[in-house]
Image: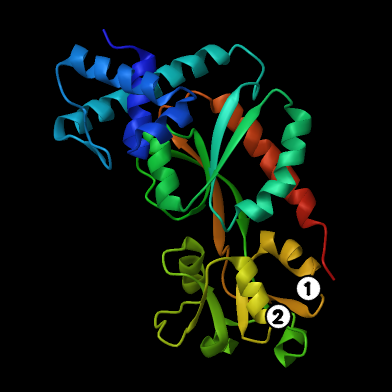
């Protein structure tokens, strides 16, 4: 009979496609991991991996084994989670995903409070784009993720906890920066710096501004911080979510923020889990903490 340890080893090899890297991930020697995989294949009577000196390939039948193995691992983690429900909330380990346009601005607000209020919680943070995090939730690699709506929500529990609007960022010498708010039609698309294609924030901005023709948008950045540096250098202007304004502008006194005067909210933030995730009590605690800290942080203004 195969063991949980063998399952974990096989999943690590399937993820890394490299026996040495898989062994490091499992904190065992390559020979220990290789022997365990060989024994597992002998017990099952199938070849899960094709390997040579250069490559590791998951066989067609091996793919089915790995899929079932991932489900077993997820079920075991759920059993452990159910047993932990009798303990204090947020007192075990949680893997939390977060997208790059939220992580740098939300985590510094939340982590000190989480550490103070829940000292026994071990939080593993995974930053990635929305589609990657949704796959990781489905496969059981992570339990929760903080994402921006909309996205395909079937198969997931979605707990909305925050709404926000966008602000236009420009240099202070721009005459439009003296306005209290600005309409999308007042923005010059030729100078508007957006994030790269595939980033959900770009889609949110295009929707908020009702921009359908993007051919005039020629500046693309990989991060919001890069966008701000380009604005600072006089390259153009940009739009950023409200939660990012304070951090991005605090070290850049030459920049101004102007509220985007378009129907909102421009972005909804949610905590996401698998449908059958058993840690609802933890989720409720986290959402309460997220909302309170964001409300408090919102009251800290940047001049």
**Residue at position x 26%, y 41% in the image:** 55
Judged from the image, the secondary structure of the residue bearing numbered disc 2 is: helix
Judged from the image, the secondary structure of the residue bearing numbered disc 1 is: loop
Picture coordinates of residue 119, whole percent (x, y): 74, 26
Q: Residue furthest top?
A: 1
Q: Is residue 116 left or right of residue 286?
A: right
The reply to whether residue 161 is in sight is: yes
**Residue at position x 42%, y 28% in the image:** 23
Picture coordinates of residue 270, whole percent (x, y): 54, 46
Closer to us: 132 or 184? 132
Picture coordinates of residue 161, whole percent (x, y): 60, 46
Closer to us: 59 or 84? 59
The reply to whether residue 166 is in sight is: no
Q: Which residue is mark 1?
A: 252
Q: Which residue is mark 2?
A: 232
Quadrant position of residue 8 = top left
């Amino acid at each position: 009979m195969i063991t949980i340890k063998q399952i974990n080893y096989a999943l690590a090899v399937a993820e890394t496609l490299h026996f040495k890297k898989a062994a490091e991930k499992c904190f065992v020697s390559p020979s220990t991991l290789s022997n365990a995989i060989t024994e597992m294949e002998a017990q099952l009577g199938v070849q899960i991996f094709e390997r040579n000196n250069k490559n590791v390939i998951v066989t067609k039948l091996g793919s089915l084994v790995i899929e079932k193995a991932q489900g077993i691992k997820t079920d075991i983690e759920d059993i452990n989670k159910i047993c932990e429900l009798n303990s204090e909330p947020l007192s075990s380990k949680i893997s939390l995903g977060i997208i790059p346009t939220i992580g740098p601005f939300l985590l510094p607000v939340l982590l000190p409070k989480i550490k103070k209020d829940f000292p026994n919680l071990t939080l593993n943070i995974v930053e990635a784009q929305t589609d990657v995090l949704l796959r990781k939730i489905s496969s059981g690699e992570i339990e929760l993720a903080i994402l921006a709506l909309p996205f395909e929500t079937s198969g997931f529990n979605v707990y909305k906890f925050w709404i926000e609007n966008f602000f236009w960022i420009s240099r202070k010498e721009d005459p439009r920066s003296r306005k209290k708010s600005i309409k999308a039609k007042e923005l010059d698309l030729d100078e508007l710096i957006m994030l790269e294609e595939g980033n959900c924030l770009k889609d949110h901005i295009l929707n908020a501004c009702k921009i359908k023709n993007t051919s005039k948008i020629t500046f693309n950045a990989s991060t919001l911080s890069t966008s701000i540096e380009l604005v600072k250098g006089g390259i153009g202007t940009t739009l950023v979510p409200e939660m990012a304004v304070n951090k991005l502008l605090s070290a850049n006194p030459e920049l101004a923020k102007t509220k985007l005067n378009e129907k909102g909210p421009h972005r909804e933030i949610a905590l996401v889990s698998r449908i059958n995730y058993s840690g609802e009590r933890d989720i409720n605690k986290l959402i309460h903490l997220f909302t309170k800290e964001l409300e408090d942080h919102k009251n800290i203004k940047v001049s």
